[in-house]
Image (cartoon, grey):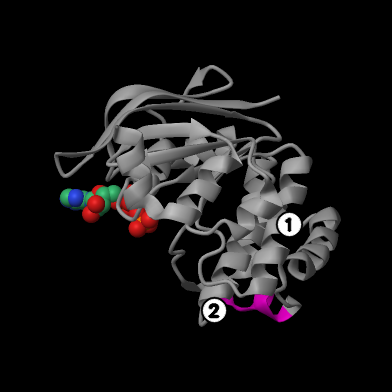
């Protein structure tokens, strides 16, 4: 059983405090939904947990299984078991998607990046591309090279399915996806959770949360957690919008 603990995290970017005193935890097999209006700090929180050098941790700690990761490099955090699926993934045209995934899985298993794909990965990839609604042809293309918005999202989820990290931080997995895509990605993420990964995800839509049924929902506003609860918070936000939700909470 893995557990990510974020303790009293305060984060600044270019000397501006974006995240203030945020604490939460998530365990294997749990889904935590991180909601909040545009610009509330969701991506900043993920990037600082992942160790991106642009994000300065002013205060607080990031722990995985009580192991303090706060000062580790991003790649060291990945090896410990924390993986991010990006809101806006970058394209790497010169590296095939299958090569990237093989290198990631090899690295996680203590092998050389350039070792051949183990037979189990080859089988999993065949199933995985179907599961997320991509085709085998996508595996032979450069990473996100010419991929549509929705295909990039599906590719991010495919990478998570193959690596099976202890904890996945997933930034808007449903943005740009058509209805069938949301269903496929939602089901794939549910399988990932059932295989033991703990998930924190951001979204601006309730649809994927109806599939994933989060254990807890956190609402971030101006870098602070202002509400914590269950799916009822998502329903309330859908009904009255963030502006009214925040007004009601600040009374
Ligand atoms: N270098 C910077 N200087 C000032 N403000 C910054 C800087 N970098 C980021 N910000 C601000 O930090 C805030 C949080 O951004 P972040 O991307 O974390 O929000 P978000 O909750 O993920 O938003 P969205 O839902 O739109 O994706 C935004 O208001 C952004 O403009």
Would you say 249 lies left or right of 76 here? left
- Image x and y of residue 139, in percent: 68, 73
Quarter of the picture containing the C terminus is: top left
Question: At x 58% / y 71%, what residue is drawn?
Answer: 177
Q: Nearer the viewer, residue 59 or 229?
A: 229
* Residue at image coords 41%, 30%: 72
Percent across and percent down for residue 43 are 38, 49
Q: In which quadrant is the N terminus drawn?
A: top right
Numbered range of the magenta stretch: 137-143
Residue 114 is at least partly visible in this image = no
Separation (CA) of disc 1 from disc 2:
19 Å
Is residue 121 part of the magenta span, yes or no?
A: no
Q: Residue at 50% x, 57% y: name it.
A: 172
- The local crowd at label 1, few if under 14, some if 14 to 19, many if 20 or more residues have their Cα within 10 Å, is many
Sequence-wise, the earlier of marks 1 and 2 is 2
The residue depicted at 27 percent of the width and 45 percent of the height is 54
Dot in front, 1 or 2 = 1
Percent across and percent down for residue 171 are: 49, 53
The furthest residue to the left:
15
Q: Choose top left, top right, bottom left or bottom right for residue 124.
A: bottom right
The front one of 239 and 161 is: 239
Q: Relative to 103, is 126 on the left or the right?
A: right
Helix, strand or loop status at disc 1 = helix
Q: Which residue is mark 2?
A: 147
Q: Which residue is mark 1?
A: 188
CB-based contact (under 8 Å), mark 1 and mark 2: no
Q: Residue furthest top?
A: 66
Indicate whether 124 appears above or below 21. Answer: below
């Amino acid at each position: 059983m893995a557990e990510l603990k974020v303790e009293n995290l305060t984060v600044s970017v270019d000397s501006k405090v974006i995240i203030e005193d945020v604490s939460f935890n998530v365990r294997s097999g749990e889904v935590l939904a991180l909601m909040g209006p545009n610009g509330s700090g969701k991506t900043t929180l993920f990037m600082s947990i992942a160790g991106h050098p642009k994000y300065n941790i002013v205060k607080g700690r990031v722990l995985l299984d009580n192991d303090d990761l706060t000062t580790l490099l991003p790649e060291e955090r990945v090896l410990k078991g924390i993986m991010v699926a990006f809101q806006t993934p970058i394209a790497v045209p010169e590296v095939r998607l299958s090569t990237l995934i093989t290198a990631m899985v090899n690295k996680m298993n203590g092998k050389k990046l350039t070792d051949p794909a183990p037979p189990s990965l080859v089988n999993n990839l065949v199933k995985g591309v179907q599961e997320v609604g991509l085709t085998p042809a996508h595996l032979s293309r450069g990473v996100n090279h010419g991929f549509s918005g929705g295909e990039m999202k599906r590719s991010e989820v495919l990478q998570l399915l193959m690596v099976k990290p202890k904890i996945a931080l997933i930034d808007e997995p449903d943005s740009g996806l058509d209805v069938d895509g949301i269903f496929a990605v939602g089901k794939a993420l549910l399988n990932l959770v059932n295989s033991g990964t703990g998930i924190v995800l951001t979204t601006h839509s309730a649809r994927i949360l109806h599939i994933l049924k989060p254990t807890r929902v956190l609402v971030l506003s101006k870098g602070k957690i202002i509400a914590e609860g269950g799916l009822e918070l998502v329903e309330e936000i859908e009904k009255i919008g963030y502006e009214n939700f925040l007004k009601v909470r600040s009374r």
